Amino acid sequence: MSVLRQNRATKNWVIVAGERSRRPDDFKMVETAEPLPAHDPLCPFCTGNESQTPPEIMALRKPGSPSNGPGWQLRVVPNKFPALQPAGDLERREKYDFFREMDGLGAHEVIIESPAHNETVGTMSYAKVEQIILTYRDRYLHLEKDSRFQLVTIFRNNGLRAGTSLAHPHSQLIATPIVPARTRHLLEEAMRYYDDRGSCVFCDMIQEELRAKKRIVLETADFVAFQPFASRVPFETWILPQKHDASFGNISVAKAKKCARVLRRILGSLHRLLGNLDYNYVICTVPFKDADENYYHWHIEILPRLTTPAGFELGSGIYITVAFPEETARYLVRAIEDGGREG
Amino acid sequence: MSVLRQNRATKNWVIVAGERSRRPDDFKMVETAEPLPAHDPLCPFCTGNESQTPPEIMALRKPGSPSNGPGWQLRVVPNKFPALQPAGDLERREKYDFFREMDGLGAHEVIIESPAHNETVGTMSYAKVEQIILTYRDRYLHLEKDSRFQLVTIFRNNGLRAGTSLAHPHSQLIATPIVPARTRHLLEEAMRYYDDRGSCVFCDMIQEELRAKKRIVLETADFVAFQPFASRVPFETWILPQKHDASFGNISVAKAKKCARVLRRILGSLHRLLGNLDYNYVICTVPFKDADENYYHWHIEILPRLTTPAGFELGSGIYITVAFPEETARYLVRAIEDGGREG
């Protein structure tokens, strides 16, 4: 018999229809593609092809190496096909007092994470992943200063099924001039919880997960990772700072490095366990103006794309998943332990 | 330059990043599979394999033909791998006063739409599609009588990218014992609009779409179909009853047949225009208890799966689409006109 579970933070229900005990191999990605080369002369993100991207916003590069040429370790460039651009104005236009539209004002940046074409966060050195998270932080703090923007969403699409067409390791960020309805609903739910109980629902979730000890994946002094009680997909994993903080923008350099190590270790273990899996991760955070609220708690959501959401998910918002997080968390913990300190 | 648009009913924003004028061929599905046979001896939904499904709940069949054998035109059976089942109880359990769970109580039925393995709604006879919509209505009215259920979601997954593994034409319905958070948010937004303006936001949307005359796809005395101003995906199309009605459960037999003809004509035209496209459709309706509310308006949402939602969509709820509905609606209107009365 299946069960319905509700995520107390998002209020979303899921159906866990785990008919039988599944082993990690049941979820393993089938490798259909040839292994990638370390360098692909046709890839616009590879060394030597810097002119194929818009000019770089920033880069970590060898001292003295000129911008937009080789010699870099990480580059941030505007997306060549931007969803939003820092131009236009903020005015909302209403046609017939009904259809609401505004300029596609915002920012859409690509973080090219490594010159090596065939890496991914789960296989990189810890130092490289630290650079990536520190770069997220830098860009966040920079974009936060622009009063036209309200929210920055940082995300990574790994693999075709996760919606990317470029194999070269990269993440993206989009700054929006509006607060999306989904974000507003999440904040409202968290605010109602705070109103009821006087505590942050995510802080409570961390406490209860640590107490239940069934879905914890990794715990350090600063971060905790678990597979949520109401996981939407098999191996969904959240990483949260132990100490309450609404906004990713408040993260210190030291903590950003620690966050990177946790992220790297989890993704590395997922890779070892499931093969070169397709996944998205997203940094869920508040609009700039809510950076110091006591009811939301920034975190990273890792969503493996092992299944395809269909009409029921689109219509109801209820995900049907085939695995209990208690079970998949156990597999992931074992993989993390097998990996040892260096993941 | 892209634009941000908000759907006034759902309050969801989308980004329309249409860099250049696209032609229908830019969206056409690449046919990779062999054409399907009319009968597949290995398909559990094909004639002769009736014993491979759970016993039928109802069927349209030749007078005198025995249940669960050949001779049917349409069958409704419980899903063999049900997400929810009509067993268990309604009590919500809370572990540690935090983790909310309940039995997977509900119903999950499959409507096998035709004995022909190689049909789809867009290529069936009008009479068959009428049977399908009338069957949705019958099952809805039946399940509505069960006081354990609160909402019925009827949906169709067409093709691999839309999340189905079985090619044989079928739809599904799931009755849930809870109101999903997504549905509640949609109702709340519609209620707030009603509170502001004293009218149903969907009724207003129909009026404004008819006035704008830019995204209307088809209009009959009883139904109107358009591609929403803030379409999430290329060729997203909504079908709404012209007259206000919150619940699909209120539809008459006569109107159900008319709805079927509109649905058939639109899907047939999408097929002619885009090839054998993958899509989901969902009947969006209210919980049973809200059947006579004045602020919501049942409708069918057709969502072609021509693109893959990625991390940004998952994190922010904002869809990035590459086509303006004004443009894709024009293509679809032309295809409908070319098809003539019989689609």
Image (tube, coloured by chain):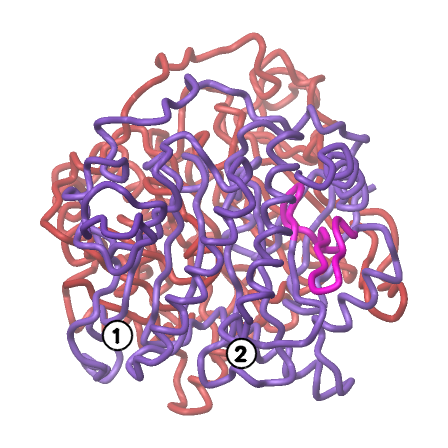
Chain colours: A red, B purple
Residue B256 among magenta residues: no
Chain for disc number 1: A
| Residue B230 x, y percent position in the rendering | 72, 55
Q: CA distance from mark 2 to mark 1?
A: 21 Å
**Residue receiving disc 2:** A188
Q: Relative to residue A200, is residue A175 depicted above or below?
A: above
Q: Relative to residue B125, is residue A101 depicted above or below?
A: below
Specify the amino acid type for callout 1: Gln
Q: Earlier along the polypeptide chain: callout 2 or callout 1?
A: 2
Secondary structure of the residue carrying tag 2 is helix
Query: What's the residue at 15%, 75% (across, down)?
Result: B88
Q: Relative to residue B262, is residue B33 depicted above or below?
A: above
| Residue A226 x, y percent position in the rendering | 26, 58
Specify the amino acid type for callout 2: Glu
**Residue receiving disc 1:** A207
Give a yes or no on whether discs 2 and 1 share a subunit: yes
* Quarter containing the N terminus of chain B: top right
Secondary structure of the residue carrying tag 1 is helix
Task: Work out whether residue A64 or residue A213 is closer to the camera in this orientation and state it.
Answer: A213
